[in-house]
Amino acid sequence: MKTYNTDDTHIITMNKDKQNLALETKDIHVWYGDNEAIKGVSLEFEKNKITSLIGPSGCGKSTYLRSLNRMNDQIDGTKVTGKIIYKNIDINSSKVDVYEMRKHIGMVFQRPNPFSKSIYENITFALKRHGQKDKQTLDEAVETSLKQAALWDQVKDDLHKSALALSGGQQQRLCIARAIAMKPDILLLDEPASALDPISTSKVEETLINLKEDYTIVIVTHNMQQASRISDYTAFFYMGKVLEYDQTKKIFTRPKIQATEDYVSGHFG
């Protein structure tokens, strides 16, 4: 089993004035009890770009992703230190309203998880919970978000049918629509296509490429081809650290670190 030096890193910085950054982490550590899963990760995410987080299983990429909107708070025994900067606010502070923050930093999970409700109610559920009652506004949100998720034409005549009747790929795009109905700035996705067939995967990828015009997207993926197809930047995680972070083209054609080259070429481990 090959081992790699985790002190050997190459991490780019985006912009000294930070004007083009949507999100930034500074020295993030995550513990599950005594296990340190993330060991001091500092990254910058550029606005209206797709960033892929890649690396072997158990390297911490999903843990890191969940820290970006504090989903790890829901796991007993978890401690997160360091700063997560969004609009000049450290959202890792105990003073931050987590539920309000998640309106701005949405998340889509690995397996489609639509509510056992109609397509329409899936989209409007969170909006209603945040006080929106105007039917015209709700109708517009449903149409807009479903169009952005490339699902409107397929479901516009069936909005009051159960979301559970949709195919797996349609359900995942509904979950994307549900997340963007809140009009977040940032969309986090944890392997959103891992449970889908190739055709559905392609549609989700096309949807994400179109969405980056309006959103900043961070995605965890095990699929190297997917990362190379859709992302502008890629971060390679290994043993709780980021060894290399750069433009995706450079990561896949001219990586600076041997571990990165071995991983993307399939010679890792």
Image (tube, rainbow, N blue to C red):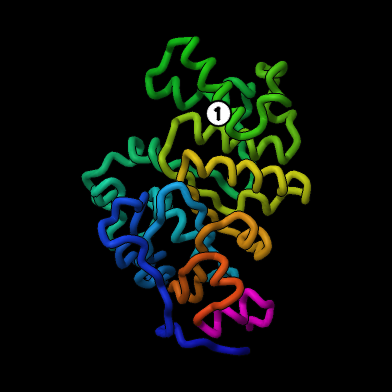
Q: Identify residue type, mark 1.
A: Ser
Q: Is residue 174 left or right of residue 243?
A: right
Secondary element at image label 1: helix
Residue that mark 1 sits on: 145
Q: Is residue 167 left or right of residue 105?
A: right
Q: Camera-side residue: 172 or 218?
A: 218
Q: Is residue 2 left or right of residue 13?
A: right
Residue 240 point in image, percent of width and height: 45, 72
Graded by Cα atoms within 10 Å as few (under 14), some (14 to 19) or many (20 or more), the crowding at tag 1 reads many
| Magenta region, residue range | 257-269
Residue 67 point in image, percent of width and height: 40, 55
**Which residue lies most toward the top here?**
135
Q: Is residue 236 above or below residue 119?
A: below
Q: Residue at x 56, y 77 (%)?
A: 254
Look at the image and tell me in which quarter the N terminus lies.
Answer: bottom right
Q: Residue at x 61, y 60 (%)?
A: 227
Q: Is residue 214 visible?
A: yes
Q: Is residue 151 left or right of residue 178?
A: right
